[in-house]
Amino acid sequence: MTTISAQSLDLTFHTGDGPVQALSDITLDVAEGEFVSFIGPSGCGKTTFLRCVAALETPTGGTLTVKGMTPDEARKARAYGYVFQAAGLYPWRTIGKNITLPLEIMGYSKSERQERMRRVLKLVELEKFANKYPWQLSGGMQQRASIARALSFDAEILLMDEPFGALDEIVRDRLNEELLALWKRTNKTTLFVTHSIPEAVYLSTKIVVMSPRPGRIADVIDSPLPRDRPLDIRDTPEFLAVAHRVREGLREGMEAA
Amino acid sequence: MTTISAQSLDLTFHTGDGPVQALSDITLDVAEGEFVSFIGPSGCGKTTFLRCVAALETPTGGTLTVKGMTPDEARKARAYGYVFQAAGLYPWRTIGKNITLPLEIMGYSKSERQERMRRVLKLVELEKFANKYPWQLSGGMQQRASIARALSFDAEILLMDEPFGALDEIVRDRLNEELLALWKRTNKTTLFVTHSIPEAVYLSTKIVVMSPRPGRIADVIDSPLPRDRPLDIRDTPEFLAVAHRVREGLREGMEAA
Amino acid sequence: MTDMPLSAPGAAIGRSGRVALAIRGLRHQGGPILAVVAVLLALWYLACIPMNAQQSVLLAERAGAVVTPATAAERRDMGGLALTFANPGPATSSAFAQDRPRLPAPHQVAVELWNTTIGQSITSKRSLVWHAGVTLAPTLLGFLIGSVLGTLLAIGIVHSRVMDLSVMPWAIASQTIPILAIAPMIIVVLNSIGIQGLLPKAIISAYLSFFPVTVGMVKGLRAPAPSDLDLMRTWNASGLRTLVSLRLPASLPYLFASLKVAVAASLVGAIVGELPTGATAGLGARLLAGSYYGQTVQIWSALFGAAIVAAGLVAVIALTQRAVLSRMGLTR
Amino acid sequence: QDDAVTLQLQWVTQAQFAGYYVAQEKGYYEEEGLDVTILPGGPDIAPPQVLAGGGADAMLNWMPSALSAREKGLPVVNIAQPFNSSGLMLTCWKDTGIEGPQDFRGKTIGVWFFGNEYPFLSWMSQEGIPTDGGEEGVTVLKQGFNVDPLLQRQADCISTMTYNEYGQVLDAGVSEDELTTFRYEDQGVATLEDGIWVLEENLEDPDFRDKMVRFVRASMKGWKYAEENPQEAAEIVLENDETGAQTEAHQVRMMTEIAKLTAGSDGALDEADYQRTVDTLLAGGSDPVISAAPEGAWTSVITDEALQ
Amino acid sequence: MSGVLILGTWAALWGLNVALAGWSAARWASPILFGVTLLILWELVVRLFAVPTVILPAPSQISAAIAANGPTLWGDFVQTVLKGALTGWLIGCAAGIGAALLVARSDFLRRGLLPVGNFVAALPIVGTAPILVMWFGFGWESKAAVVVLMVFFPVLVNAVAGLADTDAMQRDLMRTYGATTGQELRYLRARAALPFVFNGLKIATTLALIGAIVAEFFGSPTIGMGFRISTEVGRLNLPVVWASIVVAAVAGSFSYGLIALLEKRLTFWHPSQRGRG
Ligand SMILES: Nc1ncnc2c1ncn2[C@@H]1O[C@H](COP(=O)(O)OP(=O)(O)OP(=O)(O)O)[C@@H](O)[C@H]1O
Ligand SMILES: Nc1ncnc2c1ncn2[C@@H]1O[C@H](COP(=O)(O)OP(=O)(O)OP(=O)(O)O)[C@@H](O)[C@H]1O
Ligand SMILES: Cc1ncc(C[n+]2csc(CCO)c2C)c(N)n1
Ligand SMILES: [Mg+2]
Ligand SMILES: [Mg+2]
């Protein structure tokens, strides 16, 4: 079943300095429960595409449907959990309160909120920081808090924009595993932006390679890897083959541009 | 010649919620012209240490000298080029103007400012974006602009806090090479925070592995690699050995904490 | 007109484009304003009936009509609404055309405004435009002095702990001194050192307008994020530099909000300043003369004249704000 | 030689001050070699304060207010008194049942303050009526600048001047038989109004005295002309009114009424009138305006010379 | 000569103040010292230049007047500040914030109501006070009404500016939660608006006092600070006038301080408050 369907999507920003075409002729179908990674050079439109899906940006051409609805209807149906590229925590709320905010908005009970908050904070190893304010946390800790916030409620679609960019390898590996486990358990459709080829290959059922100026899809790779993926799958030949294809796609895209 | 010398440095933050010890007993000497990478889990005090060096934070114990001066004196001598973890561009200035701002402050002539601005924008591949405002750029592009800004003037000491976190592999490789070339050419003392082990090993003459809560130094590794480092040095056994040692240091630090 | 230089075709398009934009903006803005104004006018007309009921009924009584209650003393304690229901006929028939209404009808005010603006040569003493001009001069001068002084004070307060601790409380205290009470003293004192005319009024108006600017700018100048300030520190930027390149731009939203309040305060100050200078001319003098002779319609029209001037001044600032912010790329 | 004279009025430009404007327009001051500036007053201007601050050479003031200022340590001296009777009165709604001063008890009365409350306070204390509200006393309102409190029936009586506010009440459509009026003159509590006052220390200077002689002479000439030509005087006042708010009909009527108050005065202060004013004020029992009979509060040297 | 003495005193006391600034008690000592400086200079000026009392009384005369007129001043304070200014302030600020919320909720209202609101609220007190006295009588009610009109505009303008001062990402976050306008207001805009709203409230406190006092100039019962001031000016009782002004200044500074304290508690996260003792 198709959850997200984009048909020749175009998006041009109008700046004082002339138009900037951020997305051009993007056609992509994402089935329910898929884990799709987006990889591509900086400025190729990954964030913009995610924003379109979340109805934060309106495409200037083409069609986009989410679960058969317009993105905006899906947004109002609270279909999304979004982790932005920057943490975006509210400075007047403690970390714990930042995480319970979406839960409060969506009407979870108080005890449920507390319980979920504890759970996700534990997941990102910030149990001890529930009562700190955002500016009292390091950059990586803020990013983890924002991941926790997006995971705290049961959105059907997870949109994650370079969530692990500011994390060290060890935490990152652990969170990769956790994310994969969560995804397997809940079968959430996930769109995931990353710059790390191994990460993309490790996590995804589908990898979208994008190329810049204007943002186009250079390659779409359906992963042959099984759903069960221990960390050391990263040393198997299948894994390396996919990684190689991604790298090639990236390089070609860059040269073409 | 020692450029930066820290002797049993301590730093404790006082929050409404009790004290947080961010740095504990840090002793480290950095010689002139060295390239030192800091690696360690999120929240271990890397940023805090860099901020102490730049006189943005005052240690609560120990001593710290920079070129024989206090950090604050060194700051006043305009010794630092700092790339923050978040891009920190001023939203009311275009990218070009953001880059010329420190030059303006330091009294460079107009033509010199323009010329340097063009040069560094080219370095980070943003030539076409000089007249755009920060919010019209993607996350990675903003980060590149902030790197360009720190490179635009001739600071003796470069402090870079995860500058390449938001960049794709290809651009990152290229910038790694460029940074290495710049460093070899100018012999600037560089402190560099990263989460990528290969990056740390590839760039550094010295790698400081830190462990968290409270932030301590777990290991200091002097790199045996030569100053001339083609990209494929990353496949040599020496390289892999160093990388292995870093990984072990990280793992141990984590388990101890 | 005929030998006007040929302008580049692009410029012409640009201009008509701008005009089109402006018209679209007006339509965009016009609808809601008209709707709100229409509702308010309707309410206003309705309110005239009970507000003026006492007088309407009195007039009817004097004209020989039978009214209830029969004597003014009895009616005195009744509310306007009750009186309207007791005498619906008289109350409605003359509610909108009294000489000294408690609440003049909108058209009465409009007619008076028309007669005292369009209906008079602007050099005439009976022209509201002339009076507005008289008031505008000290308003603008006072606003200038006040906002410059307010900004300077804020800069001092943000940069000097001594000033923050010692001057701020007294700046606050200065504002709690009722201006109308000390205005005459200011005038007298200035007069005794030979300063007369525009300046004393401008000083009073500056006195009222500097404070909103100080309060707003203290907050605005402190608004930059710590990381932005840190950046300046790493460059060892001087205080002045940081002010010009960081604090001032970051404070602009606060500045403009303050300036709007300040310009309105300046106008009030200039009007207040007219009273102790003999109230010979200006909107304040008009207001006073109106109230002295119980000419409600005249008060209302002067009041509206003042509000129109204030709204105009606020609009000028709003336009400046838009222009400045968009030049700075801050409009999204 | 300094021939400049600044005169501070105690209210806005109106026919109440017609004599000075006429003297100005008709060139009487110029004939005396004077350069006169007339400063209009207003609700916020205390003429004694302006005088003390050096903002004016002479002021117009009601005698109670000026005597009280004198007691407060500002030595002002009356040099001329163009008004020889008082225009002050209380105007009440007849339907409130007020017929005499004793009926004021329990009623609400509007009074001008700002130094103009003294005549009322003395009167009430002579009648033995407290002024702090309640059943037995009167409730006093600080009256604004117009007759609205009466028309809106917020007060049962308000202060009016024969030449101004009373006319406004009538203009508002009220007929005289709806009203009861009490003239201070008739109640025997009249105090002198609109005298010309200067600082005592200035009078020691012969040049200043000479200037004032010429000023009073010219002013009185203006007054007499105004009395005889109310229409023209009103027009002159109108020309000098920069607010553009006065109407001719109003000013003509005011001039006619004012003429009744200045009639018969040659500018010299009548000592009997002065004494009656002082007695009235001293009779003010518990809330005295002045505590002792003032000394040297007036002088005839200026008028003596001016009237030669 | 006297000029030198005055300048010298000023310099000495300011120097003392600067020296004090580093000290921990400076928070309260500094403004007091500054105030004392002003008072000493004032007394010196009045004495050395023999300024007449009817122009400017000396601080010593003013404090004597305060001591002698305690009950009167207290009665005036209750009438003007507690009844007039406070009531008007509460209603006016509530109305200003309420209008700003309405305006923030509906674009139609923003475009229609804001200009009209600005217009109505820019009416000068000199004109509105007589009208409101005519409508609401001579008591404190009309003063409260004047205050409402006076404080409405600054609060509205600041609240509207505040409600608009959120950054794009903060808003985007709310949108992804599918938050309703009301929720966005409650969880984001209302919070982000606070630093601005407090600006408005601070300005409103001082305006409320001025408004309540000045409105009494246009008609009042025989009590109230504005009544006292205008009456005693007419009587040339300047020490009493200044005694009333002192009461006004103290009351105003005190209420301003209360608001500032509240501001500090509620907007501790704003950069302008962070890291300041
Ligand atoms: N202003 C502050 N107030 C209180 N605690 C702080 C403050 N800044 C940092 N900390 C704490 O200090 C510790 C070290 O933070 P720091 O930013 O140096 O970490 P880091 O190593 O840079 O982490 P990351 O890789 O996530 O950026 C963290 O536990 C953090 O919570
Ligand atoms: N608001 C905007 N106005 C104008 N141009 C914009 C705007 N937002 C994005 N762009 C432009 O659109 C292009 C795509 O941006 P986008 O943020 O989608 O890139 P990205 O793939 O997420 O890059 P990164 O990996 O660096 O985050 C860029 O060229 C950028 O300059
Ligand atoms: C505030 C104030 N109220 C009353 C008077 C008294 N007064 C003196 S002359 C005059 C004109 C009457 O038409 C009036 C009312 C004043 N001077 N100031
Ligand atoms: Mg992006
Ligand atoms: Mg960090």
Image: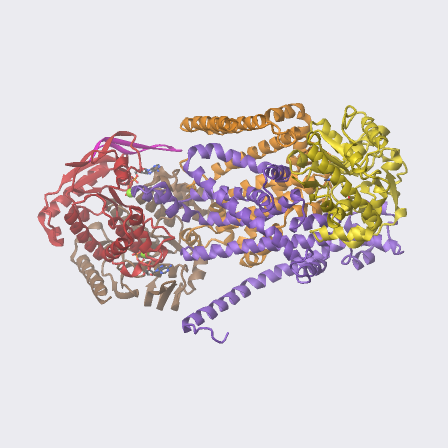
Chain colours: A brown, B red, C purple, D yellow, E orange
B160 sits left or right of D229 in the view: left
> From where the camera sits, is residue C51 visible?
no
Q: Give how far across and how far down residue A104 sits, in percent.
A: 46, 47
**Looking at the image, which is closer to me, C129 or D231?**
D231
Q: Quadrant of the C terminus of chain A?
A: bottom left
Q: Quadrant of the N terminus of chain A?
A: bottom left
> From where the camera sits, is residue B91 visible?
yes
D6 sits left or right of B38 in the view: right
Instruction: Please tell me whether the stretch drawn in magenta is mainly helix, strand or loop.
Output: strand
Q: Give how far across and how far down residue D269 sits, in percent.
A: 82, 34
**Looking at the image, which is closer to me, C288 or A227?**
C288
Q: Ligand 1 appears in which quadrant?
A: top left
Q: Which residues are magenta?
A: B4-26
Q: Give how far across and how far down residue E21 sits, in percent.
A: 42, 29
Image vertical order of residue E33 relative to residue C181, above or below: above
Residue B167: quadrant of the picture? bottom left
Image vertical order of residue A40 relative to residue D144, above or below: below
**Looking at the image, which is closer to me, D222 or E143?**
D222
So how many labels did they put on this image? 0
In the image, is residue C285 part of the stretch drawn in magenta? Answer: no
Residue B141: quadrant of the picture? bottom left
Q: Give how far across and how far down residue B243 sits, in percent.
A: 15, 45
In the image, is residue B10 part of the stretch drawn in magenta? Answer: yes
